[in-house]
Image (cartoon, rainbow, N blue to C red):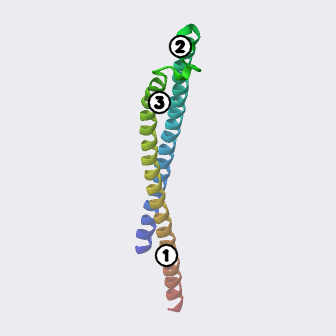
Amino acid sequence: MAICNSLETLLQYKLRQSQIDVEISNLQSLKNLKVLESADCNCILSAEKTEVRNYYKHLYRTDEEAQALYHDYTEIPGFDEDIDAVVAKIQEKLEEISAWEMNVDSQINTLQTEKEEIKAFQESMKSTLNTNLQEDFSYSLDR
């Protein structure tokens, strides 16, 4: 009977290991989606910065007074502020994604640690079962 209980316990641990594998897989899939979202944010950032640059380039080319006052379109007042505003808007979203990814990494590490503990316990139980079976078998032969 004790052997059956031990085997049942081993099966429950095996089930938990499988559940952990599914959870880790789901978290990694979600993380992959966030990586794509991060890439989209970087594309948007690049496009918006290009848009600001093009606006100031056009302004510089069409305004003779600006050409006389400044050596380059990047020196026009407001250029740096506009670029900083674009970066700040996207940077906040990127920081949220980064924080979320760190949280998911932490969850994955916790699950992997639990899985390793389960493996160690299973090995210990298997060893105990083998020892008990050998002792029971030897005991029945001695009689």
> Most extreme residue toward the bottom, as rendered?
142
The residue depicted at 53 percent of the width and 39 percent of the height is 32
In this rendering, which labeled residue sits more in front, label 1 or label 3? 3
Q: Are marks 2 and 3 in contact (CB under 8 Å)?
A: no
Rendered-image quadrant of the N terminus: bottom left
Find residue 46 and report its horizontal and vertical position in percent: 55, 26
Residue 73, relative to residue 17: is it above or below? above
Residue that carries the numbered disc 3 in the rendered image? 87
Provide residue 53's location: percent of width, then percent of height. Answer: 55, 20
**Which circle's residue, 2 or 1, is located before the other in the chain?**
2
Mark 2 burial class by Cα count in 10 Å: few <14, some 14-19, many 20+: some
Q: Nearer the viewer, mark 2 or mark 1?
A: 2
Type of amino acid under label 2: Ala
Q: Secondary structure at mark 2?
A: helix
Q: Which residue is mark 1?
A: 129
Amino acid type at image mark 1: Leu
| Figure check: 34 above or below 50 | below
Asked where in the image residue 89 lies, by quadrant, the reply is top left
Whole-angstrom CA distance, mark 1 to mark 3, is 62 Å
At label 1, counting other C-alpha atoms closer than 10 Å, the crowd grade (few under 14, some 14-19, many 20 or more) is some
Q: Amino acid at mark 3?
A: Val
Which residue is disc 2 drawn over?
66
> Which residue does the image show at 48% across and 26% down from the upper left?
80
Q: CA distance from mark 2 to mark 1?
A: 86 Å
Q: Secondary structure at mark 3?
A: helix
The percent coordinates of residue 143 (x first, y second) are 50, 91
